[in-house]
Structures are given as C-alpha cells and as structure tokens.
Amino acid sequence: MAEARDISELSFEEALQELERIVGRLESGDAALEEAIHLYERGDALRRRCADRLDAAQARIEAIRLDPDGKPTATQPFDAG
C-alpha cells in the first residue's frame, strides 16, 4: 500500500475518495487481519475528517430573511433539521 498522506492535508473530496477505496478493500475480504485493522483505523479517521468538514460547511450556510417587499433584511443560521 502506498504511503498515506496526512489526513489533515486532504480536501473533503480526497478524503471521501480514499474512504470509498478503503470500504471497497474491506468489503472485498482480501485484506489480511493486520491490514484490515490498519484500513479500518484510517477509514474511521477519514470518516471523522469528512464529518468535521461537513459540520463546518453547514455552520457557514445562512438562510436569507426577506421583508414583505422581498428585500433581504437579515440572515439566520441554516437549519437542516
């Protein structure tokens, strides 16, 4: 396996692509136990990185409030719920 880059250096897209490769490798059942453990640990770290990036992006999204004339008056935090 090639030397892995530091997870903190990966963009969201790069981390997600690597996570998808790891899941595929684990699902194939071809990895030896030690390799599977290493892949799982790296995959978990990548999953956390992606979740953190998504949380940060959601925190920056704002919904614009409009007055009766349709003009923006303020912003409020985005609520995906």
Image (cartoon, rainbow, N blue to C red):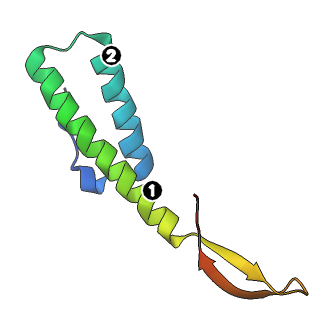
Residue 63 placement (x, y as % from top left) = 66, 73
Q: Is residue 49 left or right of residue 53?
A: left
Q: Is residue 7 above or below residue 63?
A: above
- The percent coordinates of residue 72 (x first, y second) are 77, 85
Q: What's the mark number on residue 5? A: none
Relative side of 51 to 67, left or right: left
Quadrant placement of the N terminus: top left
**Amino acid at circle 1:** Leu
Compare residues 52 and 14 and report the one nearer the observer.
52
In this view of the protein, can residue 38 be seen by the observer? yes
The quarter of the rendered structure image containing the C terminus is: bottom right
Considering every residue shown, the one lying at the far bottom of the view is 73
- Residue 58 in percent (x, y) is at 51, 63
Q: Bin the neighbour count of mark 1 within 10 Å (Cα to Cα): few under 14, some 14-19, many 20 and up.
A: few
Task: Determine if residue 2 is in view.
Answer: no
> Which of the marked residues, 1 or 2, is nearer the chain's N terminus?
2
For residue 16, above or below residue 73:
above
Q: Residue furthest front?
A: 81
- Residue 64: give x, y in percent of width and height: 70, 78
**SS of the residue at dot 1?**
helix
Looking at this rendering, what residue extends furthest in the right direction? Answer: 69
Q: Could you say which quadrant of the image residue 62 lies in?
A: bottom right
Q: In the picture, residue 56 is in which quadrant?
A: bottom left
Residue found 26% across the figure and 36% down from its top: 43
Residue with the mark numbered 1: 54
What amino acid is found at the position of numbered circle 2 in the picture? Glu
- The residue that disc 2 covers is 27
Determine whether, in the image, residue 50 is placed left or right of residue 74: left
Label 2 secondary element: helix
